[in-house]
Image (tube, rainbow, N blue to C red):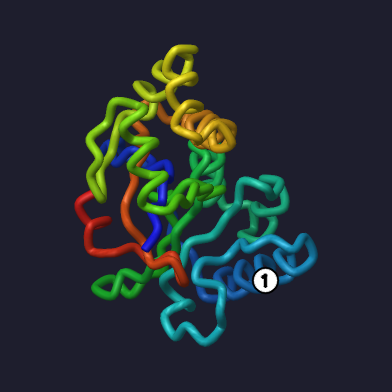
Amino acid sequence: MTVQFRIMPSNVSDPLPRAQINARQLSAFRDFLRSEGARTHTALLDPEREAQAHLAYAFEARICPIALATLARLFDYDEAVISVFEEAQFRGRRVAVRRDEEAGAILLQVGTTADHDRALYLDPHDAGALLDALGLPVDPGGTIDARWLRDKLADEAVRATVARAGLAAFLNQIDHLVASAATDPFANLAWCETSRRTHRPSPSCASA
């Protein structure tokens, strides 16, 4: 097992924009993301494998690296869709596509995953040492306010403690994780155990 540290966007129940799209627009969106991903060597679709049967109507997509005008063109400059993309880019999140089975509609909305979805992976010993150095409980899974951690890392004494634990090489990665939450005042840093081979979360992540 390994321990994953990542930023979890807030789940504050602000009313976020969503839009109804049609099958033609959905197909054009998927095709564009695949071609753009191949061109830039960037994974823009999640899941990205075509073998995933549910990909057609249930996936998240990275759109922050893409110009808003390019995205709007795919959806005939629909104002509701543009609102979704604007909000997702402002919050630094992915967009999510899902099907409303009851209404028979395809919906595009702001996702719950950070656009970059950066993560830091440590072996359990190093993860425990990092948590202890930060004054956090050495548990297999948990969350902490990202703003609290940002303030904590600004303390040179804390950084020195992390360095003494032999984790100085990871400080820049932790700084980048925390900085990525700057546009979301309610974001958390979450950690949980994952499979070392696949990085799939263990059941402990469900409570993180």
> Horizontally, is 113 left or right of 42 in the view?
left
Rendered residue at 29%/41% (across/down): 11
Instruction: Name the secondary structure under disc 1.
Output: helix
| Residue 53 percent coordinates (x, y) | 44, 85
Whether 204 is drawn above or below 10: the answer is below
Considering every residue shown, the one lying at the far right of the view is 39
> Horizontally, is 204 left or right of 167 in the view?
left
Rendered residue at 74%/63% (across/down): 41
**Nearest the eye: 162 or 187:** 162
> Horizontally, is 62 left or right of 152 in the view?
right
| Residue 183 percent coordinates (x, y) | 48, 28
Rendered residue at 60%/52% (across/down): 63
Q: Quadrant of residue 139?
A: top left
**How many other residues sit within 10 Å of disc 1, few (<14), some (14-19) or many (≥20)?**
some
Rendered residue at 49%/54% (across/down): 95
- In the rendered image, is residue 129 in sight? yes
Q: Quadrant of the N terminus?
A: bottom left
Q: Which residue is mark 1?
A: 34
Q: Quadrant of residue 132?
A: top left
Whether 127 is drawn above or below 21: the answer is above
| Residue 115 percent coordinates (x, y) | 53, 48
**Nearest the eye: 125 or 158:** 125
Q: Amino acid at mark 1?
A: Arg
| Residue 135 percent coordinates (x, y) | 29, 25
**Nearest the eye: 171 or 44:** 171
> Horizontally, is 34 left or right of 4 in the view?
right
**Nearest the eye: 95 or 72:** 95
